[in-house]
Amino acid sequence: MIPKILAAISILGIIFLSSSQPQIPPALAQTTNCDPAYPDPDVCIPSPPPDLDCGEIEYRNFTVLPPDPHRFDGDEDGIGCEKR
């Protein structure tokens, strides 16, 4: 039973790592110009290059998933470009 479940998970492209945050299936990364590390529906940030900083984008307090290619989530709490 376990091998069948693992096969189904593998086919779906779901990746489970020791991290508490979900990982991005590679197929999803290729379906849009928006980087899937920033999945909020109202946020569209392209993948690098160029490497962007918070001051160069309009979005604040958005969801960030690993690997966070722009490093918007410096404290690794899953929220990018937090307003202070």
Image (cartoon, rainbow, N blue to C red):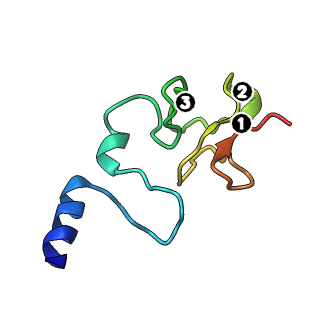
Q: What is the C-alpha distance between the residues marked 1 and 3?
A: 11 Å
Mark 1 and mark 3 lie on one chain; the one further toward the N terminus is 3
Label 1–label 3 contact, CB within 8 A = no
Secondary structure, mark 1, is loop
Amino acid marked by disc 2: Glu
In the picture shown, does residue 80 fall above or below 43?
below
In the picture shown, does residue 7 fall above or below 68?
below
Residue occupying the point 52% across, 32% down? 40
- Residue holding disc 3: 45
Mark 3 and mark 2 lie on one chain; the one further toward the N terminus is 3
Horizontal side of 80 relative to 64 (left or right) equals right
78 vs 74, nearest the viewer:
78
- Residue holding disc 2: 56
Label 1–label 2 contact, CB within 8 A = yes
Label 3–label 2 contact, CB within 8 A = no
Amino acid marked by disc 3: Ile
Amino acid marked by disc 1: Asp
Horizontal side of 57 relative to 66 (left or right) equals right
Residue 16: % across, % down:
39, 65
Residue 60 in which image quadrant = top right
47 vs 4, nearest the viewer:
4
Q: How many other residues sit within 10 Å of disc 2, few (<14), some (14-19) or many (≥20)? A: few
Residue occupying the point 34% across, 50% down? 26
Please say whether residue 72 is visible from this viewpoint: no
- Residue holding disc 1: 53
- Name the quadrant of the N terminus: bottom left
Residue occupying the point 77% across, 29% down? 55
Q: How many other residues sit within 10 Å of disc 3, few (<14), some (14-19) or many (≥20)? A: some
Residue 28: % across, % down:
33, 42
